[in-house]
Image: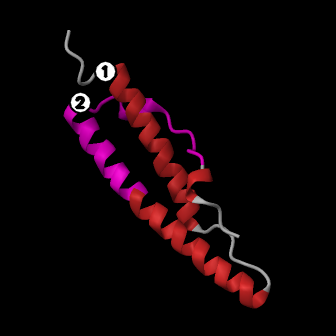
Amino acid sequence: MATQPSQITPSYTSELKYEPYDCPRLGIELNTLARREDQLVIAQEQRRKSSKVQAFWLGYGQGDGVEASELANIRGEKEAVRKAIDLKSCGKQS
């Protein structure tokens, strides 16, 4: 059976990847990643539903597909962007 989206953990991505980004660009990147994460959560839920139907009829369901690995990658990217935002103190006034 496919994994629930809430149980897919982020894969590691270094925040150094985002070191050259300025604060506005980091904000845009975070929003883009959040939208892609939402799409992948929906795709993973669909995979779970079709896996349940397949398991009912065939006795076994589908495992995780590319949706799950991409979701883990996107979540890792989001964490890296958030760390970069914290390191640059974006949104904080001196």
Quarter of the image with the C terminus is top left
Q: Is residue 11 magenta?
A: yes
Q: Which residues are magenta?
A: 9-37
Query: Which residue is rendered at x = 36% and y = 34% of the image?
Result: 18
Q: Residues within 10 Å of mark 2 (few under 14, many from 20)?
A: some
Secondary structure under badge 1? loop
Q: Is residue 58 above or below residue 64?
A: below
Which of marks 1 and 2 precedes in the sequence?
A: 2
Along the line of sight, which residue is nearer the eye, 16 or 26?
Answer: 26
Q: Residues within 10 Å of mark 1 (few under 14, many from 20)?
A: some
Disc number at residue 23?
A: 2
- Disc 2 is placed on an element classified as helix
Question: Are dots 2 and 1 in contact, CB under 8 Å?
Answer: yes
Specify whether 10 is left or right of 58.
left
Quadrant in which residue 84 is drawn: top left
Left or right side of 34 for 77 = right
Instruction: Tell me which residue sits at (65%, 78%) in the image.
Output: 51
**Residue with the mark numbered 1:** 88
